[in-house]
């Protein structure tokens, strides 16, 4: 079943596929919210921008999100302060706070009708033994100069033990928003090609050539804005993150609904917000997160959410069911910036850790500033070439699973993939049943996957 966003906006923007060789200033691979936001900023700055996508506009992760625009990414700030220090955590927070305002400014400037609403955001717990974690997060956020509050009244249809409250966060309809961006990009002489699959990118001297089945694109700059970086080397992103699947249902509760956006602080994780469907407010209830590729039954995914919805609203009706896959980094921070230290003018934004609506704007601003020769004070936080994650052996073990125990590798063993062709101490990304699987072979010829 399609998501609410794709159902409500079922009249797709009509763009051609690429059918000849062209030249542009910036080639952007991927027409999700990060790619389109980057194209918007760069085209406004006077650069000629070309976007290509193997599907239609934002039909993947952007079209299947819960579309919360927030700097409150779970209980992340205690972790960031303890791991990287107060200034780092503060810059992460205010990079995302600025992104919220950036999105609002785009919407206001371009008159994009996308159901944008300022909302309060809450991370809550129903377990009194979790309260110390919540209260510590409140103290940490206040230390960073942001006015977070500890509250016990949230507006939810059940009692909570406590919650951390961020004001002036937001939600919107992401497909209406990106369609508005498309209009602006075209108005600024940008070009968008859909159903155009990129299969390789090569660089000669200072010019990139992006190859598709219908033609090639020459450019000075390339932004890899695909959900998962499909170019393996030298970036090695398949070793630095994994994919997580989660589920959402749209529910007509038959009751008056709350305001605000909510997510529980611990497992089982539930995400709640409201949205509009046929002029009526409905509930979007998300959860069921697991590592992509792990076998999960209907009972463990959609049915678990439906039972919880019925527990909260016994007379409710399920209108929508959808799922999404998010790229999760090993250190909880996105990779934004140069694709590799050895490849100038080639940029990436990935690993948004389920917070892509806000992180995509952070990424677009950092990458566009780099292309335009501007300083961005937040770029160091999201350094795409940092080596900390891959040095974290404990986290790497959580991502990489030996072939004996790996469902994905077992699937690959039964496929036509030739493992003998993978060099020792090397790897790559393989598509198995529409799942991106990172495969690595170490020096002793053991296989790992993520």
Image (spheres, rainbow, N blue to C red):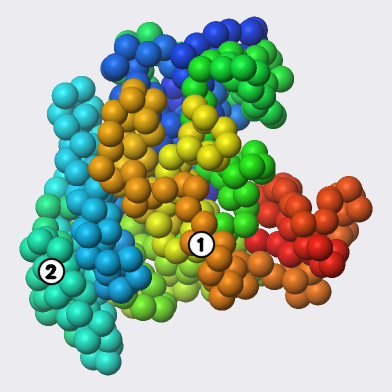
State the SS at label 2.
Answer: helix
Residue sitting at x 48%, y 53%? 386
Residue 219: x, y in percent?
Answer: 53, 15
Above or below — where is 210 with respect to 2? above
Q: Is residue 275 above or below residue 338?
A: below
Q: Earlier in the sequence, mark 1 or mark 2?
A: 2
Seen from the viewer's position, the closer of residues 60 and 404 is 404
Q: Quadrant of residue 241?
A: bottom right
Q: Is residue 122 visible?
A: yes
Q: Which residue is mark 1?
A: 389
> How far across and down, in percent of the image, does residue 126 sit?
26, 84
Residue 17 in the image: state x and y as whole percent.
59, 16
Instruction: Locate residue 240 relative to residue 154 in the image: left or right.
Output: right
Q: Quadrant of the C terminus?
A: bottom right
Q: Is residue 255 visible?
A: no
> Residue at image x 10%, y 76%?
151
Which label was assigned to residue 442?
A: none
144 or 104: which is nearer to us? 144
Count residues near mark 1 (Cα–Cα under 10 Å), then give few for <14, some for 14-19, many for 20+.
Answer: some
The residue at 84%/50% (across/down) is 422
Residue 250 left/right relative to 153: right
Instruction: Judge left or right: residue 390 versus residue 170.
Output: right
Q: Nearer the viewer, residue 247 or 282?
A: 247
Can you say whether 194 is above or below 299 in the image?
above
Instruction: Provide residue 284's location: percent of width, then percent of height.
Output: 33, 57
Please give the residue where the numbered disc 2 appears in the rendered image: 143
- The residue under the point 11% across, 68% down is 142
* Label 1: element kind: helix
């Amino acid at each position: 079943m399609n998501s609410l966003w794709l159902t409500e906006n079922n009249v797709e923007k009509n763009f051609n596929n690429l059918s000849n060789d062209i030249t542009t200033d910036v080639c952007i691979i991927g027409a999700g919210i990060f790619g389109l936001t980057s194209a918007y900023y760069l085209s406004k700055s006077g650069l000629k921008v070309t976007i290509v996508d193997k599907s239609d506009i934002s039909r993947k992760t952007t079209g299947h999100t819960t579309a919360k625009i927030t700097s409150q990414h779970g209980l992340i700030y205690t972790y960031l302060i303890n791991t990287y220090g107060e200034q780092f955590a503060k810059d992460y927070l205010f990079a995302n706070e600025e992104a919220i305002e950036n999105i609002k400014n785009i919407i206001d400037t371009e008159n994009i009708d996308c159901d944008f609403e300022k909302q309060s955001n809450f991370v809550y717990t129903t377990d009194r033994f979790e309260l110390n974690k919540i209260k510590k997060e409140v103290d940490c956020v206040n230390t960073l100069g942001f006015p977070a509050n500890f509250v016990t009244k949230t507006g939810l249809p059940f009692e909570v033990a406590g919650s951390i409250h961020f004001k002036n966060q937001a939600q919107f309809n992401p497909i209406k928003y990106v369609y508005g961006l498309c209009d602006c990009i075209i108005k600024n002489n940008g070009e968008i090609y859909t159903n155009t699959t990129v299969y390789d990118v090569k660089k000669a001297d200072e010019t990139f050539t992006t190859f598709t089945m219908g033609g090639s694109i020459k450019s000075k700059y390339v932004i890899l804005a695909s959900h998962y970086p499909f170019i393996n080397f030298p970036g090695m992103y398949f070793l630095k993150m994994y994919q997580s699947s989660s589920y959402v249902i749209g529910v007509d509760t038959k009751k008056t609904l709350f305001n605000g956006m909510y997510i529980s602080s611990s497992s089982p994780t539930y995400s709640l917000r409201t949205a509009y469907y046929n002029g009526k407010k409905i509930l979007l209830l998300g959860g069921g997160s697991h590592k992509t590729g792990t076998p999960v039954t209907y009972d463990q995914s959609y049915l678990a959410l439906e039972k919880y919805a019925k527990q909260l609203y016994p007379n409710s009706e399920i209108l929508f069911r959808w799922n999404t896959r998010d790229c999760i980094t090993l250190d909880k921070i996105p990779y934004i910036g140069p694709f590799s230290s050895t490849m100038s003018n080639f940029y990436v934004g990935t690993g948004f850790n389920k917070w892509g609506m806000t992180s995509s704007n952070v990424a677009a601003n950092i990458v566009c500033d780099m292309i335009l020769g501007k300083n961005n004070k937040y770029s160091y936080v999201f350094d795409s070439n940092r080596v900390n994650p891959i040095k974290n052996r404990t986290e790497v073990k959580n991502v990489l699973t030996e072939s004996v125990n790996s469902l994905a590798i077992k699937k690959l063993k039964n496929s036509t993939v030739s493992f003998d062709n993978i060099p020792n101490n090397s790897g790559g990304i393989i598509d198995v049943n529409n799942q991106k699987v990172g495969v690595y072979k170490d020096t002793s010829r053991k296989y790992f996957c993520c």
